[in-house]
Image (spheres, helix red, strand yellow):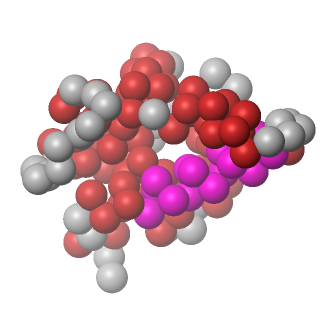
Amino acid sequence: MKVEQINSLVLAYLGDAVYETFIRSYLIAKGIPTVKELQEASLSFVSAKSQSALLKKLLEEDFFHEEELSVLRRARNAKSNHKPKNSDILTYKHATALEAVIGYLEYTKQEERKQKLLEKIVNE
């Protein structure tokens, strides 16, 4: 299936899984010893609020390529029946957009670019 035909929320679904796995591995490698501490540390990366702030910073730095910006716009503007629990709708849409780009990079097998984005996120 061509990536342009995939719903951007489906790309975000994939990106969420990739991102969460990356963050968990990153935090474990840092030597955080307990699940409770891992969970607390992960919130600074995986909450909608933190993802939205990361996206804003990356956009200000002109980090994204044109095709990634297209995915971001599609995901941010996608209609969803989901009501976010812990954030406002705009913050949630921005977090979803970041996850969609990660999903896009995963689906299109752009491993080097995906790794660069994920490493940039944890080093911000």
Residue 6 appears left or right of 27:
left
**Count of numbered badges drawn on the protein:** 0
| Residue 114 visible | yes
Residue at figure coordinates x 27%, y 58% from the top left: 9
The N terminus is located in which quarter? bottom left
Residue at figure coordinates x 63%, y 55% from the top left: 21
Q: Which residues are magenta?
A: 14-28
Front-lying residue, 108 or 23: 23
Q: Position of residue 98 (x, y in %)?
A: 41, 41
Location of residue 110 by image quarter: bottom right
Front-lying residue, 96 or 105: 96
Residue 122 appears left or right of 62:
right
Residue 119 appears left or right of 65:
right
Q: Position of residue 88 (x, y in %)?
A: 22, 26
Q: Position of residue 71 (x, y in %)?
A: 31, 49
Whether 22 is among the magenta residues is yes
Q: Main secondary structure of the magenta part?
A: helix
Residue at figure coordinates x 47%, y 26% from the top left: 50
Q: Position of residue 23 (x, y in %)?
A: 65, 44
Whether 16 is among the magenta residues is yes
Q: In the picture shown, does residue 53 fall above or below 77? A: above
Q: In the picture shown, does residue 35 fall above or below 43? A: below
